[in-house]
Image (cartoon, grey):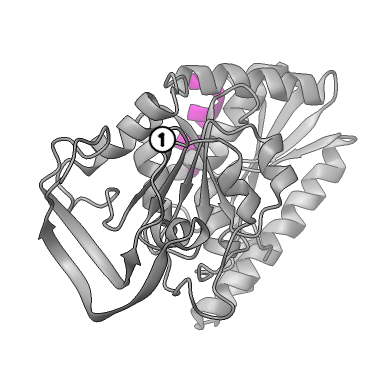
Amino acid sequence: MSSKFETILIIDFGGQYTQLIGRRIREANVYTEIVPFSISLEKLKAQQPKGIVLSGGPSSVYETGAPVCDPAILKLGIPILGICYGMQLIGKEFGGRVESAAQREYGSRSLESVRPSCLLDGLRRVWMSHGDRILEAPPGDPVRKVFGVQFHPEVAHTENGEALLRRFVFDVCRCRGDWTVGSFIETAVARIRSQIGNGRALCAISGGVDSTVAATLVSRAIGDGLVGVFVNTGLLRKNEYEKVLSMLKDNLHLNIQGIDASERFLNMLAGVTDPEKKRKLIGNEFIRVFEEEAQRIGSVDFLVQGTLYPDVIESVSVKGPSQTIKSHHNVGGL
């Protein structure tokens, strides 16, 4: 989706606030992607980012095996903002000295600027969470547009922290803020239409936000070339099956097939008490029902899946050091 929009790349070093950095930048209508620290120089350059943010992380840059990105990335001439661990990595790579602090620093602190800064103006109370410090800073170079802060501007505890991120994105990286809901819809529909063309697509729709939005976008692109399938598992609320089916047909004008498999599901679940076993049984049975309906519908060229970015984050992080949360049903399979 980034082909049309100006992009800020966030390189993930395993920080607990990495996703929050992305959210703050997107709130400014700027497209951003989170990528692992192991991203190659070639792949990063291919995305043509307007700027790069280096996230925080739990490691120490001077330790063996600490996560590092390709040093050449830091010397591309692209504006860079290092946050916490990201700042320490910049310091080390550009000739500074990083060491363990005598005492960890955690909590709110007052910020005092010793010289004017295009990023720090107006910041007074900031949030710290680190155990290392830069003892000797590397030589400064205002032309290089490489910045670092030890505190976390992305968290709510840093007063006016979002202003720092906005200044980096707009004043330093010169982004326009063109990533809006309207522009996203326009781009998504155009890409779907280009990819599917005159083909047919099949989508399982639950009536929830994820699958309904995905189906609506595809329907706008190819019309009745999309066939939606809504399965009544018998586990919906009273009258929900009828209401959702009506909404999908009458309000959103989707080409939708309703399948009432409630008796089939309830008979299968009779006597089962273990929640995880129930989840697996429901998932497997849903797949069987969906496959049977797909065979009845006939030839289709594409399967539409309502998978969100958070589903990917939950399941695999970004192949970096961040902890996997769980295998999400929309990504990892059932």
User: Residue 116 location in percent, x, y?
Assistant: 19, 35
Secondary structure predominantly adopted by residues drawn in magenta: helix
Confirm whether the magenta stretch covers residue 245: yes
| In magenta stretch: residue 190 | no
Picture quadrant where residue 203 is located? top right
Q: In the picture shown, does residue 312 fall above or below 184?
A: below
Return the residue nearer the eye: 131 or 43.
131
Residue sitting at x 53%, y 57%: 313
Q: Is any atom of residue 233 visible in this view? A: no
Residue at 64 percent of width and 71 percent of height: 281
Relative depth, front residue between 259 and 130:
130
Note whether residue 225 is visible.
Answer: yes
Is the C terminus in the top left, top right, bottom left or bottom right quadrant? bottom right
Q: Percent position (x, y) of residue 146? A: 44, 42
Q: Residue 202 vs residue 108: left or right? A: right
Left or right of residue 191: residue 33:
left
Indicate whether 255 appears above or below 53. above
| Up/down of 298 relative to 320, above or below | above
Q: Using residue 35 as the reference point, say whether residue 41 is left or right of it.
A: right
Amino acid type, residue under disc 1 in the picture: Arg
**Based on the displayed image, in which of its 4 quarters is residue 117 positioned?**
top left
Q: Which residue is more in the foreground, 73 or 67?
A: 73
| Residue 224 quadrant | top right
- Where does the magenta region start and end? 241-252
Q: Position of residue 57 (x, y in %)?
A: 43, 66
In front of the other: 276 or 181: 181
Query: Label 1: how many residues lie within 10 Å, few (<14), some (14-19) or many (20+)?
Result: some
Determine the residue positioned at 51% across, 83% down. 274
The residue singled out by tag 1 in the image is 26
Q: Secondary structure at mark 1?
A: helix
Task: From this view, report whether residue 192 is shown above or below residue 268.
Answer: above
